[in-house]
């Protein structure tokens, strides 16, 4: 009887935990995710999940690259997560697009399993380990949208 209840309680906690549904607005990232992504908790970081096969990613990433250069030194960084299963394909894609912002390869889908983005591309705005905003799918005028998002976030201590 005790084993049955232990299993039920375990399933309930697993089902209700943030990792069961991925990260959403208001969630705190695990220390493991923070470390894997190399996030500075005192800086707003925009995490951009992408892949070579994603048509919208191909369209948006050059704009994200331009924005990353504009935001450099302003307390905002962009970290890409390349979810291509073949690392060489991902690296070739990054070179083709001229990406210079930091990119973490996720060929084993470890970060994908943790974040569970429901679409590609996927953007997560993170500050002090907390997810402040999430966007999924193609976004027209991505640079403008990200700048507006940054301005709308309450980053006060």
Image (tube, rainbow, N blue to C red):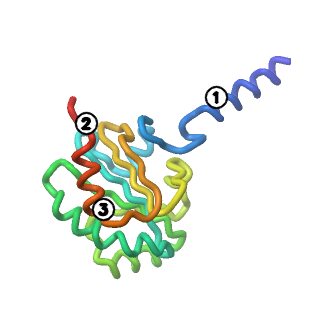
Q: Is residue 105 visible?
A: no
Q: Which mark is residue 154?
A: 2
Q: Residues within 10 Å of mark 3 (few under 14, many from 20)?
A: some
Q: Is residue 119 visible?
A: yes
Q: Is residue 64 left or right of residue 108?
A: left
Give the quarter of the image for residue 156: top left
Counting from the top left corner in percent of width and height, residue 82 is at 44, 65
Q: Which residue is mark 1?
A: 13
Q: Earlier in the sequence, mark 1 or mark 2?
A: 1
Q: Which mark is residue 54?
A: none
Counting from the top left corner in percent of width and height, residue 67 is at 22, 63
**Discs 3, 2 touching: Cβ within 8 Å:** no
Q: Residues within 10 Å of mark 2 (few under 14, many from 20)?
A: few
Counting from the top left corner in percent of width and height, residue 89 is at 47, 78
Residue at the farthest left position: 73
Q: Residues within 10 Å of mark 1 (few under 14, many from 20)?
A: few
Q: Which residue is mark 3?
A: 102
């Amino acid at each position: 009887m005790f084993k049955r209840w232990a299993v039920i309680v375990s399933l309930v906690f697993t089902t209700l935990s943030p990792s069961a549904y991925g990260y959403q607005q208001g969630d705190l990232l695990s220390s493991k995710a923070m470390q894997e992504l190399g996030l500075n908790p005192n800086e707003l970081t925009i995490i951009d999940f992408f892949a070579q096969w994603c048509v919208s990613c191909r369209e948006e990433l050059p704009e994200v690259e331009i924005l990353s250069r504009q935001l450099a030194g302003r307390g905002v960084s962009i970290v890409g997560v390349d979810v291509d299963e073949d690392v060489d394909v991902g690296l070739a894609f990054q070179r083709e697009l001229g990406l210079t912002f930091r990119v973490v390869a996720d060929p084993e889908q470890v970060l994908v399993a943790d974040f569970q983005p429901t679409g590609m591309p996927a953007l997560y705005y993170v500050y002090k380990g907390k997810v402040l905003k999430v966007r999924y799918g193609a976004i027209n005028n991505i640079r403008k949208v990200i700048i507006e998002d940054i301005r709308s976030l309450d980053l006060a201590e």
